[in-house]
Amino acid sequence: MADPTTKGVDQEELTRDEDKIAECNSDGKEIISHSFALNNACKDNSRDVVAIDDMEAAGLFGKFRKVRQFWMLLRFIAPLAVTQMVPDLAEQAINRGITSTASDEMVQLLASYGLAVYVTRWFAATASLTPAGTWLIRDIHGHNQEVSDLTNRLMTLLGPVPLIEALANYYEGGLIHFKLTAYAGIARFTDFGMQVLFVLLLLFTSKTIEPMFVPIYSVYAGYVARLILDAGFCYVLVRRKLPETHGTEKPLTVSKALRFWMPLACVRLVQDISRPLLNLVVSRNLSVKVGKEAAAKAIAVLTAVYPTGRFLFSWLNDLRTIPPTFHKDTPQHSKFKMKILSMFAFACTASVFTISAILFIIPGPGFAIMHTIVGLNVELAQLSLLPLKIFSGICLCVGLRAHLSGVLILKKKTFYLTPSAIGRLIGLIIFIASLSHTRLSGAVLGITVLLLSFVVEVILVVAAALLVRFKPNLTLTPTCLRKKNEDQAEGEEVQPLSAPAQDTRTRV
């Protein structure tokens, strides 16, 4: 029989052994749990590190993508900038030819040429072939008979120029549509080169030539060369890109074309009438207050100032082609965000304003340009300084107007631009009537009125853009121009030519 004392001791040892085993199991569970937690924490940290790396890579890629997109936009706009800047540069080359060949009668010839060029855009040669030409220049503008006769002769000789320019613009549009902007730039630059070449040839020719024919020969040489190149490039490069028309495609109707074209034509009409109207106001104002000689000087200053100031910002008008071209998916690129396009437009406008401020607002460079490069005498160069300073602010209006117009073209809401054109014309008339009775006169009066009319126009364009954004389904198109079964997709590019069926690479 077992000893009870020994049995109790064995039982205590057994209990202690079980406690030790339980304690070991508990420690093991804690160790295992701790290892699992440590492993999960490592996994979470690794996922966080990978996420951070992905975010950094995405940010870096996004930066490179923005740079690449800006570079594509720059490559696209650069040739178009040349096409816009070259006409103003060519006009200044002709002005330089006038100031060089006719120093004695520089004021009269420069004023006559400035009047003739912009009146011809409206009336072609019809006004000069009738007594209306003399009435328009001598009686309405208030110039003497000599300036009137010279202007009428120039208008007669420049009569066919608008037709040649229209044909060149038609073929140039085909090149721009297929992103062959470099070839359009070549044609424009050739236009400028031919005008400069003829000015130099006529200046240094051994034969005596009447000063009036220097700008005439130069203008025709440039426009004809540009027309030949634009038509040739279109025939060689664009004709083979045109796709075959399929029966399922909707044909281009007259109402559809008019609905898109009429608002843009109205805007262009107001833009073209601004310069002749300002010439008229400046001439009448000074001829009545001071005399006809002062009026001729003011027109001569405007003739030189307008292309000088416009040269820097004229290409901003082509910012309107960017939203319809890049805010969509194409074989060459993915859809650009509107934020990128807005940033690019802002950068272009800001750079132009900075350069204008350096050249024209800071004293010194403006006088050197007008006196040394353009060739004006000291008096006319001094008279041109203040108008150039005022002109520097117009680029801000032009850049904003062009970008928002491009957005409206993208959405096929061009009819919303019509009020801006009408508002600019009304503002032009109101500012002319009110400011003519102030101390402002001459070229300063003309450029001030022009700037204020731009401000009115851009305010209405901003209002139109806001209306389209917050009321996208609102339709203001006249009923007579609507097509009952027309369901165009918003955001589709307006195409004067059908888009090519094959993959075409950008050539800029």
Image (tube, helix red, strand yellow):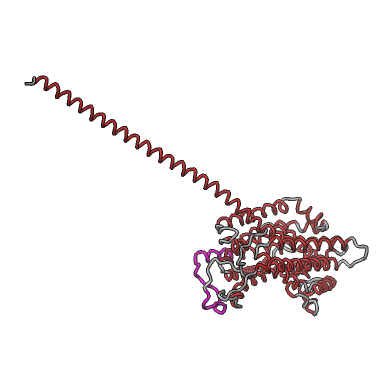
Observer-nearest of 361 and 62: 62
Q: Is residue 338 magenta?
A: no
What is the quadrant of the N terminus in the image? top left
The answer to whether residue 336 is visible is yes
Above or below for 6 versus 348: above
Q: Which residues are magenta?
A: 459-486
- On screen, residue 210 versus residue 435, left or right, reads right
Observer-nearest of 280 and 33: 33
The residue that appears at 78% across and 68% down in the rendered structure is 224
Where does the image place residue 460, in percent across and percent down from the top left?
Answer: 58, 66
Above or below for 59 versus 127: above
Where does the image place residue 131, in percent across and percent down from the top left?
Answer: 80, 79
Observer-nearest of 297 and 464: 464
Where does the image place residue 151, in percent across and percent down from the top left?
Answer: 81, 71
- On screen, residue 197 versus residue 163, left or right, reads right
Q: How many marks?
A: 0
What is the quadrant of the C terminus in the image? bottom right
The answer to whether residue 290 is visible is no
Q: Residue furthest left?
A: 1
Where does the image place residue 47, in percent across and percent down from the top left?
Answer: 43, 42
Which picture quadrant has residue 482? bottom right
Q: Is residue 465 magenta?
A: yes
The residue that appears at 65% across and 62% down in the rendered structure is 179
